[in-house]
Image: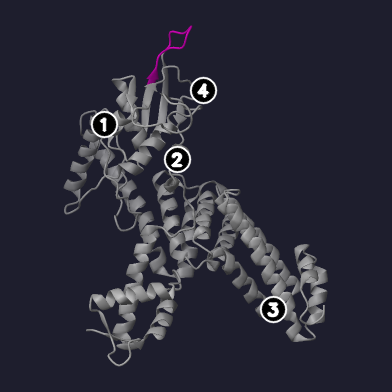
């Protein structure tokens, strides 16, 4: 290849993973060190092209999040082999590979979300029954991709949501794998990054102990028609749920009141706030005999708390409208539609929907108890449909690459705290040095854009934490 010529031939060699040919080219080019840049450029361009193709598939919903991450992992292994075997693992090639992966992975927050979904699938089913070596190998591969992310706080937010669902739903394939993942994140980002995750595990351990004590306490009570198992969670550790409790059936409410009385008498100075949006229930449902039979049919339905509240309404009426169900349960609109549609699917048609199609037409749409419901299983788990299937609103769609609002709020607080901390220590600092120092301190969680830093500085000036220097407006002074 002539010096300064195009790198099409090199790209063909890289594309077809002709490692021996590439090694020969590298050995030849390395005699004139500056010419090796052509190989590095071709490598970088190939990674970016392949990476952007994966991102585009994800944007167009061609590939699910887990498939996107598997594609990135396969790419990383392929190009790692090119750099290690053909380019002798040289530092400059490694650096270009790292920068190229970071280029397409950090275009928006999509990759952080996808990686969290992939880890969720891995820890729920992918590593179930795996030995320690297999667990370690798979999680190490995840951490390699995690290192490329600049939005580590976005990954943390999504990861915490998935972890909460695994722990509360008892869906973890292996507690050892869960703890190993948290340990790896702690090694990468420090104690502060994982302190809340570790607090979640601690809450679950204490909740099990509390449940055992409450079971012993209940033996002294009269027989109760409804039993409850409560997970007591520390507010600061778990994903915030600013959802008002729904209206529960009287028997369930009475059981919850009994637990609350026991808990507050046992642990003084505490307050319980019920999160009905995250619970689950077991309902024993009785259906009339099928034609030609005199035997009533019984199914134990495993449902969410919201679905339980909906189904109990049909004990006294056969048909209800969407408006009636909303008024009698106080379930949020989007969740109400999603839970109702889940009870009307062809496989689990416990209720019959009046309108045609997947969605719900409006407040007057009717839902009728389906006396002909059948299942081969005595115990039936009713799965939830996606929000997209239950709602036509674009807001129901997730994974658009935007940063979650809760993360944006956390970033504002973290950034302001970092600015105040730096200015308190330095007293006087010019704008560029402050931006550099803040970015350095926060890079373990996210990389703040200079414009974002400027806005937070303006806010701190308004609240009189900082002031501008009278002789130079780009110099800030800390106000004690």
Residue drawn 24% across and 30% down?
251
Residue tagged by mark 4?
376
Residue tagged by mark 3?
90
Q: Are marks 1 and 2 in contact (CB under 8 Å)?
A: no
Q: Nearer the viewer, mark 1 or mark 3?
A: 1
Q: What's the coloring here?
A: one colour
Residue drawn 31% across and 76% down?
458
Residue tagged by mark 2?
392
- The reply to whether residue 280 is in sight is no
Residue tagged by mark 1?
328
Q: Are marks 4 and 1 in contact (CB under 8 Å)?
A: no
Helix, strand or loop at label 4? It is loop
x and y percentages locating residue 382 in the rendered image: 45, 32
Up/down of 376 relative to 429, above or below? above
Q: Earlier in the sequence, mark 4 or mark 3?
A: 3
Residue drawn 54% across and 46% down?
125
Helix, strand or loop at label 1? It is helix
> Distance from label 1 to label 2 (Cα)?
24 Å
x and y percentages locating residue 411 in the rendered image: 37, 67
* Snapshot quadrant of residue 221: top left
Horizontally, is 371 left or right of 117 in the view? left
> Distance from label 4 to label 3 (Cα)?
61 Å
Residue 392 highlighted magenta (yes or no): no
Q: The C terminus is located in which quarter?
A: bottom left
Q: Nearer the viewer, residue 85 or 425?
A: 425
x and y percentages locating residue 285 in the rendered image: 38, 23
Q: Nearer the viewer, residue 113 or 11?
A: 11
Residue 290 highlighted magenta (yes or no): yes
- The reply to whether residue 109 is in sight is yes
Mark 4 neighbour density, 10 Å: few (under 14) some (14–19) many (20 or more)? few
The range drawn in magenta is: 286-295
* Snapshot quadrant of residue 422: bottom left
């Amino acid at each position: 290849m002539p010096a300064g010529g195009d790198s099409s031939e090199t790209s063909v060699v890289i594309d077809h993973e002709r490692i021996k040919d590439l090694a020969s080219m590298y050995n030849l080019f390395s005699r004139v060190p500056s010419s090796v840049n052509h190989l590095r450029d071709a490598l970088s361009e190939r990674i970016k092209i392949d990476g952007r193709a994966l991102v585009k598939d994800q944007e167009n919903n061609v590939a699910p999040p887990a498939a996107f991450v598997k594609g990135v992992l396969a790419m990383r292994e392929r190009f790692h082999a090119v750099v290690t075997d053909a380019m002798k693992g040289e530092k400059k090639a490694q650096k270009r590979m790292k920068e190229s992966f970071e280029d397409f992975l950090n275009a928006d927050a999509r990759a952080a979300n996808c990686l969290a979904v992939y880890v969720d699938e891995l820890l729920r089913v992918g590593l179930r029954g795996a030995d320690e070596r297999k667990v370690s190998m798979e999680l190490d591969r995840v951490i390699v991709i995690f290192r490329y992310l600049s939005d580590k706080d976005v990954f943390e937010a999504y990861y915490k949501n998935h972890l909460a669902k695994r722990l509360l739903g008892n869906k973890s394939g292996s507690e050892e794998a869960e703890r190993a993942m948290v340990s790896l994140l702690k090694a990468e980002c420090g104690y502060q990054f994982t302190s809340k995750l570790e607090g979640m595990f601690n809450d679950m351990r204490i909740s099990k102990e509390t449940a055992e004590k409450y079971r012993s306490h209940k033996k002294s009570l009269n027989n109760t028609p409804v039993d409850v198992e409560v997970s007591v969670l520390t507010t600061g550790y778990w994903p915030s749920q600013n959802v008002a409790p729904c209206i529960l059936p009287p028997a369930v409410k009475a059981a919850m009141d009994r637990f609350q009385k026991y808990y507050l008498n046992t642990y003084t100075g505490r307050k319980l706030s019920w999160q009905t949006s995250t619970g689950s229930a077991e309902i024993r449902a009785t259906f009339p005999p099928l034609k030609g039979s005199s035997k009533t049919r019984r199914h134990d339905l495993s449902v969410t708390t919201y679905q339980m509240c909906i189904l109990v309404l049909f004990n006294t009426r056969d048909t209800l409208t969407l408006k009636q169900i909303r008024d009698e349960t106080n379930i949020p609109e989007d969740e109400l539609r999603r839970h109702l549609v889940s009870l009307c699917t062809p496989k689990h048609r416990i209720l019959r929907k009046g309108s045609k199609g997947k969605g719900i037409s409006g407040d007057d749409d009717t839902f009728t108890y389906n006396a002909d419901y059948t299942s081969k299983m005595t115990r039936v788990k009713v799965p939830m449909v996606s929000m997209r299937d239950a709602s036509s609103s674009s807001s129901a769609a997730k994974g658009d690459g935007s940063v979650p609002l809760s993360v944006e709020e956390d970033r504002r607080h973290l950034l302001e705290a970092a600015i105040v901390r730096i200015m308190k220590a330095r007293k006087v600092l010019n704008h560029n040095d402050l931006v550099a120092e803040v970015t350095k301190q926060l890079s373990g969680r996210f990389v703040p854009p200079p414009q974002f830093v400027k806005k937070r500085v303006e806010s701190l000036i308004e609240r009189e934490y900082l002031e501008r220097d009278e002789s130079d407006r780009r110099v800030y002074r800390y106000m004690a």
